[in-house]
């Protein structure tokens, strides 16, 4: 079966659907317009459709020629709350919203994988489950679908576009492939007073600075370089004017790790460092850590399988073994905690770039992609599913 050749014939429709979704971005757990566009495209195709209760998520199941195993293919549907400055003719028509993470392309590629596989049900036994999920951008959409019992299969697979590598290539690695992402906030409380007489107050400001620096020492002294930890202080706030010592200082930031063990110990270390430095200076530190997505861990066996499928599809030189994880986070991590599988990256580097050669990454207001690469994405979904469910 020449999946690439057939996927290329679908490219005009796939691009048109992607642009339609791009014009009308939706946020969070409820993406009804995007869901309805997807369902509209699937009219007349013999599939079972299960709709989510707590989200606009949908699982579309397609049965092959005979009974067999099952595999989940996933596409996310939500956009980001940010302006678009690409200047493209099909730019977002909703102010302050943009599909800057390529989920419009993910959704369209998955819709066209449904159409492609529908023509070739004789090529697989068992069931392909197409997971259209909202709320990937920090809303835990995949987790809600799992909690509703919608997500169950023998394997799972997802592709995420990445503008920074050559269009049409696929990249991946076994094991940790994306980071955990936790939000932390530290409020250091002292006692306010006159800025000319700090000894009569308990000034929390230098204590906050000391904690900010100590968090970086903590990363290099308490964590192995082979089990990476990133702590970034991204927001600091204190005070109102030049001659008043404020009552408190706030620090806020992100914690990224690539193993559950490093995540747990880094959380404990942040608490201990903040609380004890504050105590040393007669202050009190309140530490609040809000857990985001867990580490995205690709199953080694399935990743090797998917790599073989990719090499057969696009040639050995177009599959790139990633040297290191990406420190961004993904809620496909929840699916991978339950079902063996993998997430790979699909290169979509645009042909036209600014003279410096800089490529706008995902989440940039200027993020663009080479839509030709969507044919590779459609074909890869079909090839992975049929190879796993070989009839
Ligand atoms: Ni994304």
Image (cartoon, rainbow, N blue to C red):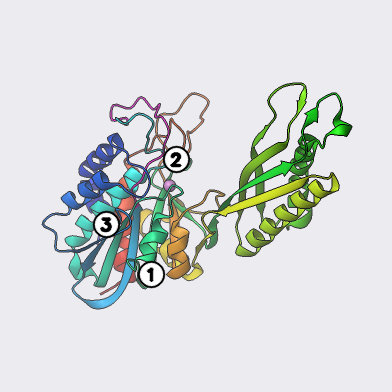
On the image, the x and y values in percent for residue 66 come to 20, 77
Q: CA distance from mark 1 to mark 3?
A: 21 Å
Q: Is residue 80 magenta?
A: yes
Residue at the spot 74% in from the left edge and 45% down from the top edge: 216
Marks 1/2: CA–CA distance: 27 Å
Q: Along the horizontal axis of the image, is 362 left or right of 269?
A: left
Q: Mark 3 — residue?
A: 3
Up-down relation of residue 242 to residue 47 (above or below) = above
Q: Position of residue 355 (x, y in %)?
A: 49, 23
**Residue occupying image coordinates x 79% and y 46%:** 278
Numbered disc in front, either 2 or 3 = 2
Question: Image check: 100 left or right of 176?
Answer: left
Mark 3 neighbour class, 10 Å CA radius: few under 14, some 14 to 19, many 20 or more: some
Q: Earlier in the sequence, mark 1 or mark 3?
A: 3
N-terminal of the pair, mark 1 or mark 2, is 1
Q: Which image quarter is the C terminus in?
A: bottom left
Residue picked out by circle 1:
155
Q: Write down the quadrant of residue 80 in the picture.
A: top left
Q: Are marks 1 and 2 in contact (CB under 8 Å)?
A: no
Give yes or no for contact between labels 1 and 3 (Cβ–Cβ under 8 Å).
Answer: no
Residue that lies at the very extreme toward the top in this rendered image: 242
Which residue position holds label 2? 163
Residue 8 percent across, percent down from the top left: 25, 47
Q: Earlier in the sequence, mark 2 or mark 3?
A: 3
Q: Nearer the viewer, residue 295 or 187?
A: 187
Is 378 located above or below residue 305 in the figure? above
Given the current orientation, which residue lies at the most extreme right position? Answer: 199
Does the magenta-highlighted stretch encompass residue 33?
no
Q: Which residues are magenta?
A: 76-91
Percent position of residue 235, x then y: 63, 36
């Amino acid at each position: 079966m020449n999946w690439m050749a057939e996927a290329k014939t679908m490219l005009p429709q796939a691009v048109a659907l992607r642009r339609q979704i791009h014009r009308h971005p939706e946020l969070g757990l409820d993406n009804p317009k995007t869901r309805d566009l997807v369902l509209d495209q699937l009219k007349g195709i013999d599939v079972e459709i299960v709709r989510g209760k707590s989200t606009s998520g949908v699982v579309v199941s397609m049965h092959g020629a005979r009974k067999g195993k099952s595999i989940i293919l996933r596409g996310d549907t939500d956009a980001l709350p940010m302006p678009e400055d690409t200047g493209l003719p099909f730019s977002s028509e909703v102010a302050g919203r943009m599909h800057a993470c390529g989920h419009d392309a993910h959704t369209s590629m998955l819709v066209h994988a449904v159409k492609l596989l529908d023509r070739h049900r004789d090529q697989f036994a068992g069931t392909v489950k197409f997971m259209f999920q909202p709320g990937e951008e920090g809303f835990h959409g995949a987790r809600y679908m799992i909690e509703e019992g919608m997500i169950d299969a023998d394997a799972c697979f997802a592709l995420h576009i990445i503008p920074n590598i050559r269009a049409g290539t696929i990249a991946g690695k076994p094991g940790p492939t994306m980071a955990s992402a936790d939000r932390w906030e530290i409020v250091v409380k002292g006692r306010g007073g006159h800025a000319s007489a700090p000894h009569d107050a308990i000034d929390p400001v230098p204590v906050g600075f000391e904690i900010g620096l100590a968090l970086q020492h903590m990363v290099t002294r308490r964590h192995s370089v082979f089990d990476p930890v990133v702590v970034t202080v991204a927001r600091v706030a204190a005070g109102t004017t030049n001659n008043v010592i404020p009552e408190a200082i706030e620090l806020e930031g992100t914690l990224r790790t690539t193993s559950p063990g490093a995540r747990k110990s880094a959380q404990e270390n942040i608490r201990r460092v903040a609380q004890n430095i504050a105590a040393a200076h007669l202050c009190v530190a309140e530490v609040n850590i809000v857990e985001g997505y867990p580490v995205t861990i690709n199953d080694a066996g399935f990743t090797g399988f998917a790599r073989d499928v990719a090499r057969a599809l696009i040639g050995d030189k177009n599959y790139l073994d990633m040297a290191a994880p990406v420190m961004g986070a993904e809620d496909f991590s929840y699916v991978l905690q339950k079902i063996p599988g993998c997430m790979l990256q699909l290169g979509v580097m645009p042909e036209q770039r600014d003279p410096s050669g800089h490529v706008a990454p995902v989440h940039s207001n200027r993020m663009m992609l080479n839509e030709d690469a969507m044919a590779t994405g459609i074909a890869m979904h079909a090839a992975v599913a049929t190879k796993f469910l070989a009839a």
